[in-house]
Image (spheres, rainbow, N blue to C red):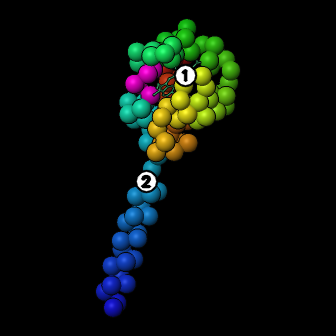
Amino acid sequence: MKKMTLLLVVVSAVTANLSFAADRTGEAIFKAVCTTCHTAGLMNAPKFGDKAAWKPRIAQGIPTLYDHALKGIRMMPPKGTCTACTDKEIKNGVDYMVSKAK
Ligand code: HEC
């Protein structure tokens, strides 16, 4: 019985670890999710690294960009369709694209 309890403790420790996995970096999120639209500029998405396209977006302020990336705006889907991404990961993705478009 003791062994069983120990096993349960170990298993729940492992699964807890998984669900609290560290947020992925902006670059990782960009490559996994945002690149689909933002590299080619699909549906008029501001292209990655395109300073002119990003300038008026950045001018809205970073909190607004976070908000639009999380909730979506016009053709930009909420979280860029990545429902499994954490809010922090989406913000990291925004930070990454913004940092490359300044
Ligand atoms: C399905 C295509 C698609 C994906 C995937 C996508 N985007 Fe977008 N995104 C768009 C489009 C289209 C726009 C332009 C929306 C508009 O202004 O009409 C946009 C605009 C934005 C903007 C500017 C919003 C503003 O207020 O001007 C940000 C920030 C953004 N996307 C972040 C992201 C991030 C971060 C990801 C990855 C997690 C991502 N997007 C994934 C299509 C996409």
Instruction: Choose the circle earlier in sequence order: 1 or 2.
Output: 2
What is the span of residues highlighted in magenta in the rendered image?
A: 34-38
- Quadrant position of the N terminus in the picture: bottom left
Residue 9 position, x and y percent, is 39, 77
Q: For disc 2, does the CB lie below 8 Å from ligand 1? A: no
Asked which quadrant contains residue 27, the reply is top left
Question: Is residue 44 one of those drawn in magenta?
Answer: no
Query: Disc 1 or disc 2, which is closer to the eye?
Result: 1
Residue 10 position, x and y percent, is 36, 74
- Quadrant position of the C terminus in the picture: top right
- Is the magenta region chiefly helix, strand or loop? helix
List the residue tagged with mark 1.
75
Q: Is residue 92 visible?
A: no
Residue plotted at (38% across, 33% down): 32
Residue closest to the eye, 71 or 52 = 71
Q: For this view, does 25 lie left or right of residue 53? A: left
Residue 55 position, x and y percent, is 60, 13
Query: What kind of element bears circle 1?
Result: loop
Residue closest to the eye, 77 or 61 = 77
In this rendering, the answer to whether 46 lies above or below 23 is above
Asked which quadrant contains residue 11, the reply is bottom left
Query: What kind of element bears circle 2?
Result: loop
- Disc 1 vs disc 2: Cβ atoms closer than 8 Å? no
Circle number at residue 21:
2
Q: For disc 1, does the CB lie below 8 Å from ligand 1? A: yes
Residue closest to the eye, 99 or 56 = 56
